[in-house]
């Protein structure tokens, strides 16, 4: 048994202190958890927007002819519902840390940016908020996604 000196100058047996193993996971893994839960939330919010478009299209600021991609609100509603379900499922899969889930999360966040950009005339402030969240998700997953796999 080896002896080491502590800061007070006394010697103690090194077996009293368990060896600390360095971890490849840093505090940045929290950003990936943030991204996963934001994807779950954004997916749910997309679905809600889709149901509003299906059942109450007069809620939106402009008529469907004023959208970047002209389609009636029924088509936009179904696009939002299906996209929302996919984004929420990708967010849940992202919690596993699997590489395929990270790739899917980034691709769906990119599609979400495009859909919200095309829907901006109907729901401007909300679209900008969701685009911002999507950019944060993309950043977190690309920069820190591999840390969640090791957690």
Image (tube, helix red, strand yellow):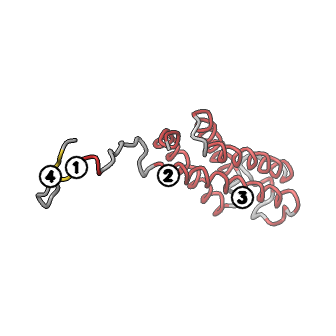
Q: Mark 2 = which residue?
A: 31
Report whether 45 appears left or right of 150. right
Report whether 29 appears left or right of 96. left
How many numbered discs, if any?
4
Q: Mark 4 = which residue?
A: 5
CA separation in Å, label 1 and label 3: 58 Å
Report whether 24 appears left or right of 4. right
Q: Mark 3 = which residue?
A: 45
Badge 2 element: helix
**Residue at x 34%, y 46% (from the top left corner):** 20
Question: Of all residues shown, which one is farthest toward the front?
Answer: 1
Nearest to the observer: residue 75 or residue 134:
134
Viewer-nearest of discs 2 and 4: 4
Pointer 1 local density, CA inside 10 Å: few below 14, some 14–19, many at least 20: few
Q: Earlier in the sequence, mark 2 or mark 3?
A: 2
Q: Earlier in the sequence, mark 3 or mark 4?
A: 4
């Amino acid at each position: 048994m080896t002896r080491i000196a502590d800061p007070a100058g006394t010697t103690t047996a090194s077996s009293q202190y368990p060896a600390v193993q360095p971890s490849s996971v840093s505090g940045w893994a929290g950003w990936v958890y943030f991204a996963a839960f934001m994807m779950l939330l954004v997916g749910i919010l997309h679905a809600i927007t889709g149901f509003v478009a299906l059942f109450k299209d007069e809620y939106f600021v402009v008529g469907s002819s004023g959208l970047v991609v002209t389609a009636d609100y029924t088509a936009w509603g179904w696009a939002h519902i299906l996209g929302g379900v996919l984004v929420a499922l990708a967010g849940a899969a992202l919690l596993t840390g699997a590489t395929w889930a990270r790739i899917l999360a980034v691709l769906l966040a990119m599609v979400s940016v495009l859909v919200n950009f095309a829907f901006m005339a109907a729901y401007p402030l909300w679209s900008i908020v969701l685009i911002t969240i999507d950019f944060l998700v993309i950043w977190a997953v690309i920069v820190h996604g591999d840390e969640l796999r090791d957690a």
